[in-house]
Image (cartoon, grey):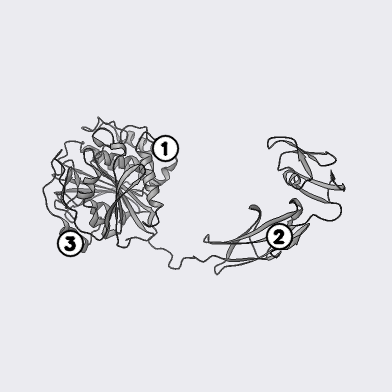
Amino acid sequence: MVRHSLARRARRAALALGTAAAVLLAPLVTAPAASAAGAWSQRTAGGMTVELYRPTTAPALPGGRALMVSLHGCVQTSQVLKNAGNWAATADEHGMVVAIPAAPNGGVLLGCWDYYDTNHSRTNPARHDDNLLDLVSALLADPSLGIDPDQVYVSGLSSGGGQAMVMGCLAPDVFAGVGIAAGPTVGTTSGQIGSVATSLAQARSTCRTFAGSHAAGFDTQVTSVVFGSADTTVATGYGTLNAQVMADLYGATTTSSFSLAGLAGTNTAGSGSLWSDADGPRVSLIRNTGLAHAWPAGGGPGGSYVSTNSVDYPAYLTDFLFENNRRVDRDPDPDPDVTAPSVTITSPADGATVAGTARVEVAASDDRGVDRVELSVDGAALATLRTAPYAHDWDTTALPAGSHVLAARAVDAAGNAATTQVTVTVESPTGPWCGTATNAQHQAAGRAVSYGVNPYNPYYAVGSLAYLGLGDATVTTLREVVPGRFEVAAAC
């Protein structure tokens, strides 16, 4: 059973205005939204105009704010859902950001989202899917919103409900929860709304195909479905089918029922069903008696395809998602490790001159232990040191004479890191040179030449033109027998 606190229901009941349900194809009814702690603004993201509600209340769950992407239906507009969808009070109660995008380029026929058919992908520019994923990415990247990527949800009505199901199937790794209101099932055509035109097996296969390599996201995703008994636009059978499809994908095989009597809203007649696994609810289905084809706002001013004579679906959906989110760490570490290690290169000193083999010594410490120290020269990896004392014998002869940057990066078990560096001068060794290095390093130091133009080119020793083999990475040992003449040596 989904829990609802008495205080929560009382606050929502005060917001329910009890206006009549919107009639199918009724003209837009506009009225000022109820006052709330947060505020609406408008921005462009994902190639769409987006109505954005930003609360001022604290997020209800650890990790940051939740994001609800709410999709309008056909004929309906994002402005209608903003003004009449009854999202603000619930958003304030949970500290949740709500984004209501307008379908790109006015949508398809009658302003619909293009949920239909099976050619959906994350990158198809001809569909709306990539726009919505780009929207989520843009909002996650906005630090002022503080959105937790484990609390990203999508919901919608009619074509928006169908699109919400598509997005839940296409990107289960992105969307932790889905809300489908009177939406057709994935894989159906735009003309298959009046009667159920697909099977559980077909829809499940389509959904899993959409997910592709991201199907593991189904393991922690949850879904809520709602439909009205008086819906004459989208077949009511799709509501039950949508719930069954998602429950089957999730492996939620235990079914139970619940009463709508305890829910917020002005009309709580109907029935509720739950599909659960061993850890609790995964899918919820509400059949709201008397509700037509409309967004079940359950309060507020009402508007085109918005019913105020219904359950308060924004409240119910958000409660269900928050209470059953499988991705949020509800018991975070009370003492997380946020302190970076300290690290110093103790040898060689900054500005030192080195030649031949130089001993690199690093001092690194952390209050909870250093995991590793990573050495690099001029940005190229040199060595990874796992245990103290952190020391490494560095063969400087592989480098050309001159200035080089030696860096040490210490990392602790929590991933906190700190870096330090020194600049040293590598000096050419005195006397006949002898050393082992890659062909590319020999060439950089002037000991080898290559006449090729690709990574598989042959190398030759300077002076003797002795053949050194193919490729940059081939290791050879050279000895300078007389100044400027290098020959292959078995060892130094």
View extreme (right): residue = 482
Q: Which mark is residue 10?
A: 3
What amino acid type should be assigned to the residue bearing mark 2? Val
Mark yes or no: residue 342 visible: yes
Instruction: State if disc 3 and disc 2 touch (CB < 8 Å).
Output: no
Give the amino acid at mark 1: Thr
For marks 1 and 2, give the CA distance. 48 Å
Q: Give the left or right position of residue 83, taking residue 438 as reference.
A: left
Q: Give the labeled residue for mark 1.
A: 123
State the residue position of label 2.
424
Disc 1 versus disc 3: distance between alpha carbons? 44 Å
**Tag 3 or tag 1, which sits nearer the N-term?**
3
x then y, percent, for residue 310: 16, 49
Q: Can residue 412 be seen in this view?
A: no
Judged from the image, the secondary structure of the residue bearing numbered disc 3 is helix
Q: Residue at x 32, y 39 (%)?
A: 104
